[in-house]
Image (cartoon, grey):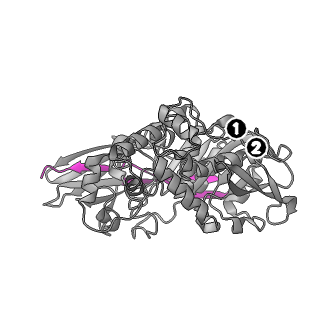
């Protein structure tokens, strides 16, 4: 039987607002918005293995293969979404057959069905295991995709009614799932020693670790694709930004303009909330959500980061704003990429960023060459052309440069922003000016262009063992007004 200790919440507020107190007294049934300007998670409880309520589906067993491993499959209760409603997920743990793992690579990009059979490590995972790094797999997916649709719908209704982030699965259950998976692995003291924990994934599995790493200091690195990074005006429900978005022609989907995923504005307004309520909520919770608001503390911790937001993605829909306000965040911009997008004809098809990122993170002394650090951009308009100069920090030398551009791109998040690609001809190889130490390009401006968006991609090859990896980093996405 569960006792009070086993069922205690793993979510808390340090400073209790009157509105939140009313929610608690009503057992989360209040119509008023809970203040979110506080820590979302109780890390003492998150890291307590006694509250996991583990069910063992497959105990530790030997799995033969190119790299022999030991594996275990369990289910855990992340915690109760509300009293009596468990949020249970499976967790598969994989370690080398002949020793303990020291740290591990973590991802939620699986499903309960895919976790049932023993894992067959891919090439990257084999390299990690050979180096003594474990693997931990769990499930960060829409609950409806694995038979829990009613629970997901009930959670969404509770959130729309209260704006209490505990009920929003993407704010609470998904990042908590990853953190509780860490607790699950480290409870296996005969199989895991503490070490680095790097998380990776795309979409919800890019957003969830990006949020979890803000709260859980056991996590040391994140590689996230097609997922939010920064707190742009659209995400904060700025009315001017939303008026511009809603004035754009075409059909806008449910993601563009959303705070940290699908847009919940319409449902919250229908439940009786105001735009001021939405602005208060997004402003107060954003410190707990966005990488951009936590860069300094992450760097003090030594966290390594790399993001692949895509240039045409429905979730990462605010590239111009992010490039202007957060130019130092490490990103790779695959031209014309995003959810369901095939990419530009000249897309860097040899890109191996994720493998190089993880290998360098876990084995920095064994990787020859260091991935590039973010460069800075200088530009000027001279005689009807845009002159661009890209400079890398000292000691960070690129092997190549390629620049991409668009004229008069539609506003962030709009249907045309997402649907109109960078034209096939709008790219050029850059030249290294060795005297100045910069990569340069000149783009002839269209005669009627009011603005130009551009970014550049740069390659650096690194080596691990006898394998080389082509890595790429981008300059900040930059928008320039031409004055026309």
**What's the CA distance linking mark 2 and mark 1?**
8 Å
Question: Residue most toward the top?
Answer: 15
Judge by depth and name the residue closer to the eye, 341 or 281. Answer: 281
Note whether residue 363 is visible.
Answer: no
Determine the residue positioned at 28% across, 54% down: 453
Instruction: Please report contact status of discs 2 and 1: CB closer than 8 Å, yes or no.
Output: yes
Residue 71 or residue 9, whichever sits in front:
9
Label 2: element kind: helix
Coordinates of residue 40 in the picture (x, y in percent): 56, 39
The residue sitting at 54% across, 61% down in the picture is 153
**In this view of the protein, which residue sits in the foreground, 114 or 310?**
114
Mark 1 = which residue?
45
Picture quadrant of residue 374: top left
The answer to which quarter of the image holds residue 248 is bottom left
Expressed as whole percent of the image width and height from the top left, the position of residue 379 reads 26, 45
Q: Which residue is labeled 2 in the image?
A: 51
Q: Is residue 443 left or right of residue 170?
A: left
Q: What stretch is highlighted in magenta?
A: 456-484
Secondary structure that dominates the magenta span: strand
Residue 368 in percent (x, y) is at 61, 47
Residue 103 covered by magenta stretch = no
């Amino acid at each position: 039987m569960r006792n009070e200790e086993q069922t205690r919440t793993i979510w808390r507020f340090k400073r209790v607002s009157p509105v939140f107190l009313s929610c608690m007294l009503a057992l989360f049934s209040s119509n008023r918005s809970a203040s979110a300007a506080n820590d979302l998670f109780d890390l003492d409880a998150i890291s307590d293995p006694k509250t996991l309520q583990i069910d063992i589906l497959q105990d530790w067993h030997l799995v033969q293969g190119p790299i022999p491993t030991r594996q275990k499959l369990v289910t855990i209760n992340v915690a109760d979404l509300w009293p009596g409603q468990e949020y249970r997920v499976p967790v598969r743990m994989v370690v080398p057959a002949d020793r303990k793992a020291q740290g591990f690579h973590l991802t939620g990009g699986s499903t309960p069905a895919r976790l049932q059979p023993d894992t067959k490590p891919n090439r990257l995972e084999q390299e990690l295991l050979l180096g003594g790094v474990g693997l931990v797999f769990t499930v960060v997916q829409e609950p409806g995709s694995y038979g829990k649709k009613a629970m997901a719908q009930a959670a969404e209704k509770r959130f729309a009614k209260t704006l209490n982030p505990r009920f929003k699965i993407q704010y609470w259950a998904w990042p908590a799932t990853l953190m509780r998976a860490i607790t699950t692995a480290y409870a296996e003291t005969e199989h895991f020693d503490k070490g680095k924990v790097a998380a990776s994934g795309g979409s919800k599995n890019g957003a969830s670790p990006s949020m979890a790493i803000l709260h859980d200091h056991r996590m040391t690195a994140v590689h996230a694709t097609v997922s939010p990074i920064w707190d742009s005006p659209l995400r904060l429900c700025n009315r001017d930004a939303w008026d511009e978005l809603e004035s754009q022609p075409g059909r806008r989907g449910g993601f563009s303009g959303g705070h940290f995923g699908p847009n919940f504005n319409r449902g919250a307004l229908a439940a009786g909330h105001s735009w001021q309520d939405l602005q208060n909520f997004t402003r107060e919770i954003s410190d707990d959500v966005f990488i951009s608001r936590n860069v300094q503390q992450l760097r003090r911790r030594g966290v390594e980061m790399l993001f692949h937001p895509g240039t045409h993605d429905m979730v990462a829909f605010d590239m111009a704003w992010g490039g202007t306000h957060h130019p130092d965040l490490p990103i790779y911009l695959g031209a014309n990429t995003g959810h369901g997008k095939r990419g530009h004809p000249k897309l860097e098809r040899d890109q191996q960023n994720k493998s190089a990122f993880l290998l360098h993170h876990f084995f920095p002394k064994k990787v020859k060459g260091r991935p590039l650090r973010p460069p800075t951009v200088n530009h000027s308009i001279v005689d009807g052309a845009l002159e661009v100069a890209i400079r890398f920090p000292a000691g960070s030398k690129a092997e190549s440069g390629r620049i991409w551009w668009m004229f008069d791109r539609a506003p962030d998040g709009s249907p045309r922003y997402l649907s109109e690609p960078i034209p096939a001809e709008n790219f050029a190889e850059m030249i290294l000016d060795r005297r100045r130490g910069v990569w340069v390009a000149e783009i002839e401006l269209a005669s009627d262009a009011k603005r130009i968006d551009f970014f550049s991609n740069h390659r650096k090859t690194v080596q691990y063992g006898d394998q080389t990896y082509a890595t790429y980093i981008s300059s900040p996405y930059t928008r320039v007004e031409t004055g026309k």
